[in-house]
Amino acid sequence: MKFVSSAVLFAALTMAAAPVLAQDFTGQVKARQGQFRIMAINLGILGAVAKGEVAFDAAAVKRATDTLAAVSMIDQGPLWPKGSDNMAMDGTNALPAIWDNAGDLGAKWAAFGESVKGLQAATDAATLGKALGATGGTCKACHDANRAPLG
Amino acid sequence: MRRLIRFAVGLAVLGMIAGWVLTRPVTLDDSVFAGITGDAARGEPVFWAAGCASCHTAPKVEEADRPILAGGQAFASPFGTFYAPNISSDPAEGIGGWSVIQLANAMQRGVSPDGAHYYPAFPYTAYQHVTPQDVADLHAYLATLPADATPSRPHDVGFPFNIRRAVGGWKLLFLNADYVLADAPMPEVARGRYLVEALGHCAECHTPRNALGALNRGQWLKGAPNPSGPGRIPAIDPASLKWAEKDIAYYLETGFTPEFDSAGGHMARVVGNFARLTPEDRQAVAAYLKALPR
């Protein structure tokens, strides 16, 4: 009898827990969107310099490029669990293609990190603008393949 | 009674003949290209502005300086799935054997070298405005790109849309030779109109379509459902797009929005194309978008 009740309890627990364990990736989605937001804010600081809206200030540029370098070192693996695509859940534009092409996201993330070195080497608004174009290319390459259109 | 039947039959035959004549493929006059010589170097920016590579490279191929236009990308629509054909320089499977006038008839009249209508998934409704010089230059540039012998995949289009002749009727109804922005007195806006309405064929995605797949010109660039997938293509008319001209030009160069998000999906490829044009051309697009009536 005790055995039966613990079996029932176990079954009830697993039934209750299973959908949560399998489906709830909102934390991972928030984390990856948050890192993109940090990137956008710091790219915006650099972009204002590149567009000529703000003067080139080496210290401010260094803070922004160091932040981007730090974000580029965040391990993406844990943030992209299988089943966290836009077909499986709401609140994300991540295409299933990410999981169909294993390694593609990681390679494109590494390309972003590599492009940040160009930003760190910039010495004035012109070189920063050129490097920012290269970084933009790495953003675009990944969004082209892996993100659904917004809207 | 017998006379009535004869009359009705006669009328039906006349109608069929009229329909046959009206829906026949109409081609350009050869004289359009008299005295025009193509130049490959000038054709390269035409190629990028026209976005040829965005649809005619093989599926999932990344951007390249000298793309292989093997075709094969699928474009789902309410009428069936269209597959972009091979337009590489291969003489058998691609278009390496085409003359300038054949390319012009394809791009500007939607008529193939063997005299069949193309489906308007190929944006000849926009390319009709392209200048003969630009077509000739593009023809010269396309010949310099790599050949690929992949056969074109037939479209997967069901009855009645698989009747090519019916496209002639569609053209009669919807092929409009006028620009949407009728007046463009400033040269910059005129250039932008050429880039947006003709070469760039932006409206193909950014303008909603009617039940027969024709663009609703009254809703020009006011956003539309994604023609080939879920989601919506954003509105970029002056009432909707609040970005400064400078921000639009910067977006077309780098893909960064004013909030420093970055373009995705098919637009990422469009940005890749516009990034290869001059700053003046990107600025012209921005000027055109702001010049549209609100």
Image: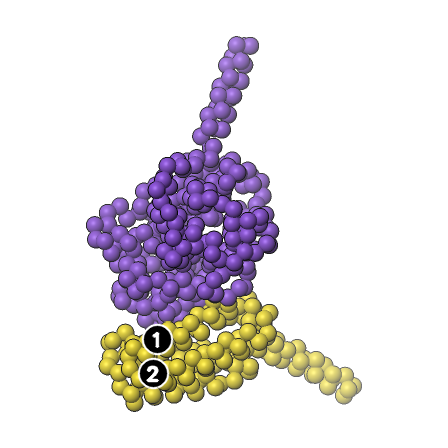
Chain colours: A yellow, B purple
Q: Secondary structure at mark 1?
A: helix
Screen quadrant of the N terminus of chain B: top right
Q: Which of pointers 1 and 2 lies earlier in the amino acid sequence?
A: 2
Work out how far the residue at label 1 is from the one at label 2, CA to CA, in angstroms. 9 Å
In the image, taking residue B220 as reference, residue B164 lies left or right, namely right
| In front of the other: A139 or A24 | A139
| Chain hosting mark 2 | A
Tag 1: Cα neighbours inside 10 Å, few (<14), some, or many (≥20)? Answer: some
Q: Amino acid at mark 2?
A: Ala
Q: Residue at x 47, y 53 (%)?
A: B143
Q: Name the residue nearer the viewer: B272 or A143.
A: B272
| Residue at (37% x, 47% y) in the render | B37
Query: Dot 1 falls on which chain?
Result: A
Residue A47: image quadrant is: bottom left
In the rendered structure, the answer to whether residue A9 lies left or right of residue A77 reads right
Residue position marked by numbered label 1 in the rendering: A130
Residue drawn at (34%, 54%), measured in percent from left and top? B196
Q: Which residue is mark 2?
A: A122
Residue B51 appears in the figure: yes
Q: In the image, residue A57 lies at what x, y percent?
A: 26, 86
